[in-house]
Amino acid sequence: MLLERAGDVIVLEPRRMAARMAARRVAEERGEKVGETVGYAVRFEEARSEKTRLLFVTEGVLTRRLASDPELAGVSAVVLDELHERHVHTDVALALLRRLRETKRKDLALVAMSATLDAEPVAAFLGAPIVRAEGRPYPVTIFHEDAVDDRALELRVASAVRRALGETPDGHVLVFLPGAAEIRRAMDACASAAQKYDALVLALHGDLPPDEQDRAVGSSTRRKVIVSTNVAESSVTIEGVAAVVDSGLVRRAEHSPYTGLPSLRVEKASRASCTQRAGRAGRTREGRAYRLYARSDFEARPEHETPELLRVDLAQTLLELRASGVRDLAWLDEPPAKALGAAEALLARLGATDARGDVTETGRAMLRLPLHPRVARMVVEAERRGVADDGVTAAALLGERDIRLATRARVGSSIRTSDLPTDRSDVLAMMDALYEGGDVDRGAVRRVELARKQLKRLVRTPQRLREKAAEDALLTSILAGYTDRVARRLSSDPPQAGRREHGRGRALALAGGKAELAETSVVRDAPLVIAVDAEARGASVLVRIASEVTPEQLVEIAPDLLDERATVEWNASAERAERVSRLVYDGLPIEETRAPASGPEASELLYRAAESAGLAGSDFDTLRLRAAFAKVPLDDAAIARALRECCEGRSSMAELREAGLFDLVRASLPMAQIERLAPERITLPSGRSARVTYEPGNPPWIASRLQDFFGLRDSPRVGDTPLVLHLLAPNQRAVQVTSDLGGFWERHYPKIRRELMRKYPRHAWPEDPLQKA
């Protein structure tokens, strides 16, 4: 119907697979090949010609078309399919199309479609009527779990698939899982059940090659168990599905405007999403849906998914809008102010926008590339440095999960890190794997090669540098895209200038906190790294892909973020003042030198350290307690003055101790009076000297062997106060604590003597303790 209008028709699909398959299906219905009247254009791939009038596109393709052709010349209608998925580009396209229709293109027909859309807000936003096309679904019987099943997800899936194959005599089983890793594990777990029922087990997700996707969704003479991500939830129709197994899970991308880091979490799908999944079993026949969660769990879920615009990185979106001259835009859901602020800050840091927020020459160069601004900035820098080919190869690799199968296998393995190779960059290591082949993911390599081929068409400067110079230039280019992701390998101190430390662990100091280098990274020796692929995991950050960076590269790429600071600081471990020269990058100390300090600032630090340490500790504490017991006033101010005088011209505790501070303080006190009233030691009849311990609020005491007191009738005194005596056995344990020595001899000694004679027969234990032993 839309093709009957004059002009072209664009159909927006949220996924590449859906755009390709929808174009193919409509072309078949028209008796044509894809690329004639009906075509498609997705990231790095297209099939269209001069005859194409109906074009299925993914969201990014449409927003780029709007940036280069704001009035959509020659287009009579735009259809936004599966609007309920609410990807970022969906919301951007919806807002831009509404704006265009209300201003310059009142003739433009807009259609928003979905089977589970909350239609009223969208209709109000567009000022459009709601058209309900009631389908004729077949009934679907839904089964929920009755009790919590603690088994691994793949085992629960296998049990449900076995049940579905047994309870449905024919038809396919469609399984919904959150991601490719879960799909691989579930396929292995389902193998025995599939063999029993002569069924094929096939994967379906966006990263598969088109032929494998076609095999999963196409017709088949055998039953199939199709293990899929939510791509099969609404965007793709698979004929002959009789049963659905729903994990109830979805992998969602989120972005923190505070850390600037993405996270990918497995969460519960919404009720609308679960309803869509179950409905896949009732498209052409009665079906069954086996939900791996309880009914109460389903009813507690949110009605709809949270739009991506409210939870992901908006840097690319904002750059495209700024390039189109769009500053103020009415949104279906207003994006968070913090997320917009973070996106603006990143674009300014990348040099994509200027102080006014206008797109710079660098920003326009970045917009040529269908890449995130970080990666686009890296490629633009690589062009400028003569390593364009390496830049687009790195960009293509960063758009995929790690192609190295051996690296994936190391996750959680018992292989020691010290047994693994090291390199300057995980990006370089992945490039080596791509060029050399070997143990790599062939599907991922195909996707990388396709992306690399498309990107090469978009760069303007061929590769000029080779080997080592090219490697250095590429690493500098990587920094250009990640100037806010510089991290220092964590140790007790920042790296010392001119020294390279090896194997200091995986802990990193990242701006604003700490991070950990993934065990699969080869960048294990570099003091400074760039966190190229980093993911927030709660309070921690995991750096999967890292690349070495040097202070010289930081000076070259981001000189405004570097600051050299010289301070005088107290080194507690060395007990001295030191002059510290630090090179600080964006608030992160990345290099420092230390040397002994001198001068008034160093003396002041020494004075404060000595004062807080209690003036060298126990000697001063004892002197204070003795003076207090002897009722001799001890002038703390005088001690402080003496301390300050001793600190002048000095910078370490070692120098202070050599200066004889304690002797200076003693000389200022009436030590004769203190020695008479509060002696430091007393001599016992045995000739042994015992230290007197003075404690605030308690009488002074001494501890010595019992034999040392033989011949002494009464407790010795300090001043008028009898000492508390700790009478020790030969094993240095007290047999009695008393301040009445005479009473002890009379009442307790006879009994204690017998016990001591038995235990220590070689020692003398006179019957009369007043006789010396």
Image (cartoon, helix red, strand yellow):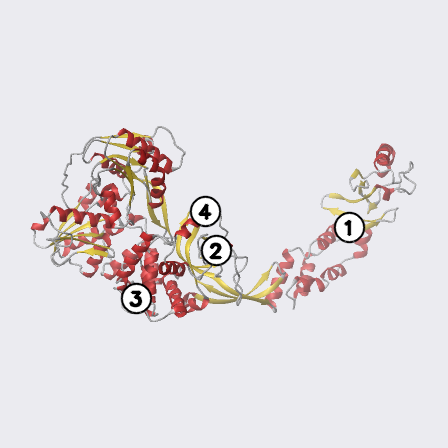
Q: Report the amino acid beneath label 1.
A: Ala
For discs 1 and 2, the disc positioned in front in the rendered view? 2
Asked which quadrant contains residue 606, the reply is: bottom right
> Residue 339, can we see it?
yes
Question: Is 48 located above or below residue 566 in the figure?
Answer: above
Residue 412 disc label: 4
- The crowding category of the residue bearing disc 3, from other C-alpha atoms within 10 Å (few below 14, some 14 to 19, many at least 20), is some
Q: Earlier in the sequence, mark 4 or mark 2?
A: 4
Q: Report the amino acid beneath label 2.
A: Leu
Left or right relative to 589: residue 32: left
Which residue sits at x=44%, y=50%? 410
Q: Which secondary structure, mark 2?
A: loop
Q: Report the amino acid beneath label 3.
A: Thr
Marks 4 and 2 in Cβ contact (< 8 Å): no
Q: Which of marks 3 and 2 is nearer the N terminus?
A: 3
* Marks 3 and 1, how far apart at CA: 81 Å
Instruction: Check disc 3 and report the residue beneath it.
Output: 362
Instruction: Check disc 1 and report the residue beneath it.
Output: 630
- Given residues 266 and 523, the one toward you in this image is 523
Where residue 162 sits in the image (x, y, percent)?
Answer: 32, 32
Q: Earlier in the sequence, mark 3 or mark 4?
A: 3
Q: Earlier in the sequence, mark 4 or mark 1?
A: 4
For discs 4 and 1, the disc positioned in front in the rendered view? 4
